[in-house]
């Protein structure tokens, strides 16, 4: 299974396996990683799954996957950065094995 490394705002990293076809929000929530809340369960309505895609991965992951994600990104609690994504919208593919995402200090 591909791995994703989640780095919290203090630099602590946790690497976990995320099933192909699942999303990066579930990877955090199912593995008990603090920092990604995913309150709406991936329904693209809460903005509590905000993450910063590591700059080495921004090109591979790409920008928001829909206009809805782009609009909801305006509602995140922490500052927006170039790599900001809602990680429930990042689907695991073989190309994302080794992905690194950083988590904001807060989601609310
Ligand atoms: S989990 Fe709610 S928008 Fe991503």
Image (cartoon, rainbow, N blue to C red):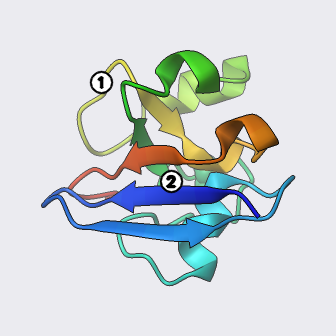
| Mark 2 vs ligand 1: CB below 8 Å | yes
Q: Label 2 belongs to which residue?
A: 49
Taking the spot 75% from the left edge, 53% from the top edge, the residue there is: 43
Mark 1 crowd level (few <14, some 14–19, many ≥20, 10 Å Cα): few
Does 30 appear above or below 20?
below
Q: Quadrant of residue 62?
A: top right
Q: Quadrant of residue 53?
A: top left
Does 95 appear above or below 83?
below
Taking the spot 44% from the left edge, 46% from the top edge, the residue there is: 100
In-image side of 89 versus 56 (left or right): right
Taking the spot 36% from the left edge, 25% from the top edge, the residue there is: 55
Residue 40 at least partly seen: no
Q: Which quadrant is the N terminus positioned in?
A: bottom right
Q: Nearer the viewer, residue 47 or 20?
A: 20
Does 26 appear above or below 107?
below
Mark 2 crowd level (few <14, some 14–19, many ≥20, 10 Å Cα): many
Taking the spot 79% from the left edge, 64% from the top edge, the residue there is: 19
In-image side of 93 versus 74 (left or right): right
Does 56 appear above or below 102?
above
Distance (Cα) linking label 2 and label 1? 14 Å
Per the image, label 1 sits on a secondary structure element best described as: loop
The location of residue 66, given as percent across then percent down, is 73, 21
Residue 76 at least partly seen: yes
Q: Nearer the viewer, residue 3 or 88?
A: 3
**Which of pointers 2 and 1 lies earlier in the amino acid sequence?**
2
Per the image, label 2 sits on a secondary structure element best described as: loop
The location of residue 56, given as percent across then percent down, is 41, 25
Q: Label 1 belongs to which residue?
A: 81
Do labels 2 and 1 touch, CB within 8 Å? no
Numbered-mark total: 2
Q: Residue furthest left?
A: 10
In-image side of 89 versus 71 (left or right): right
């Amino acid at each position: 299974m591909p791995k994703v490394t989640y780095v919290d705002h203090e630099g602590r990293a946790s690497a976990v396996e995320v099933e192909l076809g699942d999303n990066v929000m579930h990877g955090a929530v199912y593995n008990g990683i603090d920092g990604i809340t995913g309150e709406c369960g991936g329904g693209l309505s809460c903005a509590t799954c905000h993450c910063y895609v590591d700059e080495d991965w921004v090109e591979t992951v790409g920008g928001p996957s829909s206009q809805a994600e782009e609009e909801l990104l305006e509602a995140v609690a922490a500052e927006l950065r170039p790599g900001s994504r809602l990680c429930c919208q990042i689907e695991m593919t073989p190309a994302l094995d080794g992905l690194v995402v950083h988590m904001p200090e807060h989601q609310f």
